[in-house]
Amino acid sequence: MSDPIEKLTGLGDALEGAPMPLPASEIRARGDRIRRRRHAVLAGASAAVVAAVAVPVMAFTFDGDDAKEAPPVDNSVSDPVPAPTSASLSQSNLLTDEQAIYPNGGADWRAAGTSEGDGQAAASPCQQSTMKGLGAGTVFQRDFEFVSTDTGEVATTLHFNEVIAEFPSVREAEAAYTEIRGWYDDCRPTGSESYRAGEFSDVPIGEVGLVGAAEVQVSSYGPVDEEIDPFGEESWYLETGLVQIDDRIAVLTQLIHGQDYNWPEGTPVFQMAPDAATQLALGNEGQTAEPTPGVDWPTSIPAGFPLDSGWPEDDGNDEYRLDAPSADNQAMIPAGELDACLFSPADPGATARLTTRLSYATDGYVRELQLFPSDREATSYVDQLRQLFGACPTDGTTPTFTTEVSDGAIGEESVVITRVGEEIYRTVINVVRIGNAVVVDLTSDEGLAADIDSLTVETSENLADVVAAVNDLQGGTPGDDPGPDLSAPAGTTTIPDAFPLDRALDEPPVADSDTQVAGPDGTVDGVRPQTACGEPLSMPGRGDPADRLGYSVSTIGGYDGRTLETYPTVQDALDRMEQLRAQLQGCERDDEGDGLSARLWESHSSDTGYESVTFGWTYEATEFQAASAGQLYTVVRVGNAILGLEWGSEGSAQSQIDLAPDQVQLAKLIAAEMCVFQAAWC
Amino acid sequence: MEAAEFDELYAASFRRITSQVYAMIGNLDEATECVQEAFARAWAHRRKLDKAEYPEAWVRTTAYRLAVSRWRRTKLAKRPTDRAVGAATQQAAVDESHVALVAALRQLPEAQRQALVLHHIADLPIHQIAAEIGVPEGTIKARLSRGRTALAALLTDEAPGGLAGGMSHV
């Protein structure tokens, strides 16, 4: 027998000398995309004021040799995102003369020339490669000149240009965007003695209505040439705007000199970037996500839709003023209720709308339900709001509001936007999309800013009935729409191989001598059979489903069992949920435990955003049953699939009450992956 | 962490970490993808990485968690190509004896396998393994002892490409 340790040590060298599968730059690009997706709020750049130093003007030459040294584009990775099929990039995608502004008054940027391809001179003193060198197919550049609107004089020492480029794929555009972004970290303009790079900050481009990214950054360097600044009081201020819309990129470069760069209303490029995004998107609509095919989206909101459910009820107080749900109520966007940093979302083009408002003392409530032609437009609206608020970390003066944007766990996708004042004033905006419907729920009060979390939880819970009603709407129960046949064979009955039934709220468990982990696998028993008041409960784990997946974790401390089952039709799943509710109704205690004491059954709040029930039993405390124990269940239906969760452990009825929200949260997490079983799909 | 530092860390430790994760999970493609994804996350969280005493350990732990999570749920199903940094990548062939060793490792309980890999392949001292996994040093020693015994029983000189444990090579 050989020495196993020797073999083990040798295994460490097994891959030595093997080629690196991906270059580090690709890994970093991926990391940067992860950061961007996390909507990291970057510090604002507008206040980047750096002490002035002296002299030479930037050498703007970009010769051919530099272009040849541009980093090669790695094409070794296949790109799953197809190239666009829409109109090609053209000069019309550049900023127009009117859109190029210098918002200081007395001066303006005027279009001076447009060319195809990368220019002979670098568009920016930090440019390290041509767009072609980054893999772009079509490139255009427009140069602008700085004109005094009073005298008509042109200042030749100030520069502004825009370069736009189209790449073979979205992925390559993303990679190029990341590459360009990196130029400004370690830039050293020719002739400069000092260089300070500001942080990139997001720019709201919601009005474009497409998924994309826009950021601006201000760098300063010096010295400024003595002919321009004989007293050495100025710096160069390089403001760069980067915009990516699908497979296209725009780079805006403004270079001016001065003693400071203060723009309280927003820097010039910051103000031009949304227009640049709008221009860039022209003719590229084919790049947006396609609507889910084969779905008859609801087109009308039924009368009596409970949009104001979950709000305080009228207690006769004079300060209670409710505008009942109606399409005649002013929409939230024109009412300015969704403004952020002076920007309003663009009209998202809903086909049906219902809006309601409640004012109660100092508390304000607004809700709006909108239906869109398909889930594509609904998703676009959610993205627009996410971007708009994500680009506005602070807003207003006295008090200043701080905004945070995070993903929610309601519906098929949701965004939670919190805005707080310096000490008091809280606002929570929940944006929830289910199919082609988007609910925007806004609640504000004068509570303590530090206690924003409680308002977040409260507003989420208050939405339960609305979300359930929207789910019903998507399920096809509007009054004038017969909707889909729930008894028809379901679209998906096979559980995807990679279904994350083992999703964890915290760190996933690791099997060891004390912890047995089984599954996820079709052969694993997750939720174990259970009876209540003599009735075998209608939960996953019983019967003959179309498909089943089980997962369990057993430890000394307890049992975590999960079973996901699919049924041939949505109606089958609905029937099982109905049966379960009927079985639980009226069953408060039974004697089917260990015989020492009765089991007490309790229902808990089950705010998963889907049809669900959360319930459990614990032993009745008696002189024979000192050590309490019990089992807690959440059963949630999404389309034709039902997920069952079982937690068994020692604990009292109170500890089960405390545990229930965690189990509901876990059910939410997993249920969010069950959209494949919905008619609207994911 | 600056780009140059990151690139250096990546170049110096990618293969090492991949071989360690491969030894732990037994699937080289999966190990490669997970290590790439872990490095991408490391770059995305580079400020956190700056504070980590052992950046390589941070990447390895992240890759291992990714791998374990994926491995449990994929069941060798074909995965969409966007799950990690890139599409499937060309891998170096692994020596047959290494395949056999990895197959033997996979027969060990996960905790023993992890201890063996970290100690004998990653060359970490016991106290560092205990810190990385979050268990007492005595537990690590016990796992190493049991793991070595079990591994020795699974490997034979006569079957360099195969497994012991009752297999006949007549």
Image (cartoon, rainbow, N blue to C red):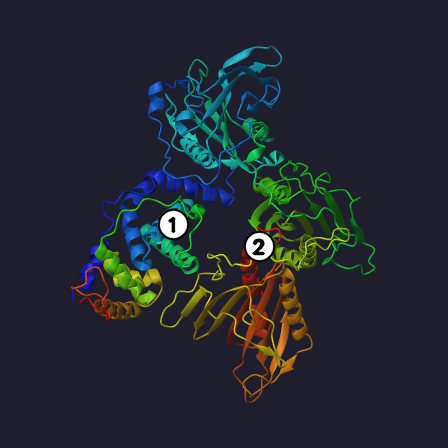
Secondary structure at badge 2 equals helix
Task: Name which residue type carries label 2.
Answer: Cys
**Percent of width and height locating residue A524:** 46, 69
Q: Do residues under tags 1 and 2 come within 8 Å of each other at their CB atoms?
A: no
User: Residue at 27% of width from left, 42% of height from top?
Assistant: A19
Task: Name which residue type carries label 1.
Answer: Ala
Please tell me if label 1 and label 2 are on a single chain: no
User: Residue at 52% of width from left, 27% of height from top?
Assistant: A261
**Percent of width and height locating residue A94:** 55, 23
User: Residue at 63% of width from left, 74% of height from top?
Assistant: A602
Indicate whether A430 appears above or below A464: above
A333 sits to left or right of B19:
right
Indicate whether A656 appears above or below A147: below
A164 sits to left or right of A347:
left
The numbered mark 1 sits on a residue in which chain? B
Distance between the alpha carbons at the discs numbered 1 and 2: 27 Å
Secondary structure at badge 1 equals helix
Name the residue nearer the viewer: A429 or B117.
B117
Indicate whether A626 appears above or below B110: below
Q: Nearer the viewer, mark 1 or mark 2?
A: 2
Q: Mark 1 = which residue?
A: B38
User: Residue at 57% of width from left, 14% of height from top?
Assistant: A147
The numbered mark 2 sits on a residue in which chain? A
Confirm whether residue B124 shows in the render: no
**Percent of width and height locating residue A59:** 39, 18
Alpha-carbon neighbours of circle 1 within 10 Å: few (<14), some, or many (≥20)?
many
Name the residue nearer the viewer: A419 or A357.
A357
Confirm whether residue A21 shows in the render: yes
**Percent of width and height locating residue A362:** 74, 52
Give residue A675's mark.
Answer: 2
